[in-house]
Image (cartoon, rainbow, N blue to C red):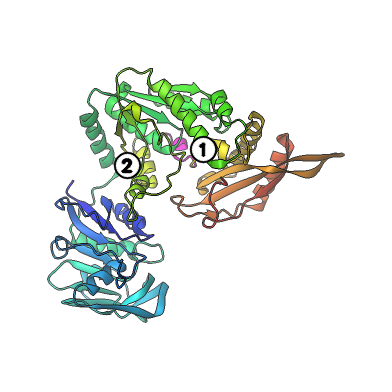
Amino acid sequence: MQNNVLILDFGSQYTQLIARRVRELNIYCEIHPFHNIPDNLDPFKAVILSGSPFSVRAEDAPHPDLSKIKGHKPLLAVCYGAQYLAHFNGGSVEPSNIREYGRAKLSMIKSGEIFFDNIPENTNVWMSHSDTIAQLPKNAVRLASTVDVLNASYRIENEETYAIQFHPEVYHTTHGKQLLENFLVKIAKVEQSWTPAAFVETTVQTLKDQIGNDKVVLGLSGGVDSTVAATLLHKAIGKNLYCIFVNNGLLRKNEFDSVLHQYKDMGLNVKGVDASERFLKALEGESDPERKRKAIGNAFIEVFDDEAHQVTGVDWLGQGTIYPDVIESVSVNGPSVTIKSHHNVGGLPDFMKLKIVEPLRMLFKDEVRRVGKEMGIDPELLGRHPFPGPGLAIRILGDITAEKVRILQEVDAIFIDGLRKWDLYDKVWQAGAILLPVNSVGVMGDERTYEKVVALRAVESTDGMTADWVNLPYEFLQEVSNNIINRVKGVNRVVYDISSKPPATIEWE
């Protein structure tokens, strides 16, 4: 592929957003840490430098060697990148007199510049920096200013090098996508050929070449990632893909049977394994969240290993790893110290000695769904809310019993069915119920009760990194609460969680 874009990450919280915006233009891009520039730059038609929490004036600031990039490849420097180019090329960067955060307007745009085609003056941009470019670098031409920032954008004469002190990737920059398109399509001449159809075609062929007649075993979770990964592999190798769908007893009500039937209807070579009792036994008496996760992870490894060994001659392990997982493991700050211990099939034992195949490892979540849609996967499967690997175990605070699982499955089913009935399910990114380790006093008829409390949670998000609670209609919450208390024996109080992430997390454990 010769139409790639390289994004060098200096540790900005917005770097993944740059990549998402580039891919929305149907252009393929990759994120690499600033200290790990690829030796071979031939596949890359353009380079983007990200922002950073660092100051270019700090001793420990990122300082990559751009000698093979600047002046040789079309280069767009964003925020820290713009200041970096100025600081080390004859300009100067100084602390800003005012904090340059939030919305600003481009009060001046130099006319006749392709970079600003179809972008009007006074357009909104988003600033996020405490330093500012006081003096432009050598051979630079100022392209845009705001009231407070003289050098909001510049380019270098006789180079395809452009720089901006604002963030085009964030929603608040009104014409940010247009700016990226001007740079990548009009200036760098990158082809817009990165589409779901093209991805499916090239990936299936790559998998055929990579795997040949070998066998692949893959653990299905019922989630979007593993489902799309399995479908791609099935297209490439057919019955040589062996899928295992494990019921850990902690899935949603009736989910094991319904999803297993869906998988079989898709033509997948799938085996359902009901290991509910094994998982519940492993969790017996365990209340600590991390130990619960480890118990579930270990039980899954044992069950999966038992089943995988029943397939003879397996060479490959298929996984639904997606790009945010890959980026995390090679981030600017090195591999993450803590990786979620419940990541699907993430801790399989070394002695399995299987080669790994990850067909989705370069896709973001929204792209995974688009690829799934391209392949005709049932919209109900593709539109499913994310569900944690340990299932309801981390939505039952405290120890796990079969009775608690039953109660939460019933509560969850009423909540999720209610969201569907009220046409709210697809407007929510993730929803679920949490069984709290407290009882409350209630009155039912003439009787005093002392029963469980459940919390309902519904959030909106794009990738789970941040999330806001959803303002569900009071009438809906009233109906769901009544249904839960009237129909689920053991619950007499329902509360709604209105915490955002951060500071709270989406799950309670």
Front-most of residues 420 and 188: 188
Residue at image coords 32%, 73%: 120
Tell me if mark 2 has few (under 14), some (14-19) or many (20+) residues whose alpha carbon lies within 10 angstroms of its own: some
**Looking at the rendering, in which quadrant would you find the N terminus?**
top left
Residue at image coords 32%, 61%: 177
Q: Which quarter of the picture shows residue 231?
A: top left
**Looking at the rendering, in which quadrant would you find the C terminus?**
top right
x and y percent of residue 441 in the render? Answer: 79, 44
| Residue assigned mark 2 | 361
Left/right placement of residue 484 relative to residue 98 reads right
Query: Is residue 200 among the parts visible in the rendering?
Result: yes
Residue type, label 2:
Arg
Q: Are marks 1 and 2 in contact (CB under 8 Å)?
A: no
- The kind of secondary structure element at disc 1 is helix
x and y percent of residue 101 in the render? Answer: 42, 72
What is the magenta segment's predominant secondary structure? loop
| Residue assigned mark 1 | 293
Front-most of residues 336 and 241: 336
Residue at image coords 18%, 53%: 44
Residue at image coords 80%, 39%: 449
Q: Does the magenta stretch include residue 380?
A: yes
Left/right placement of residue 478 relative to residue 99 reads right
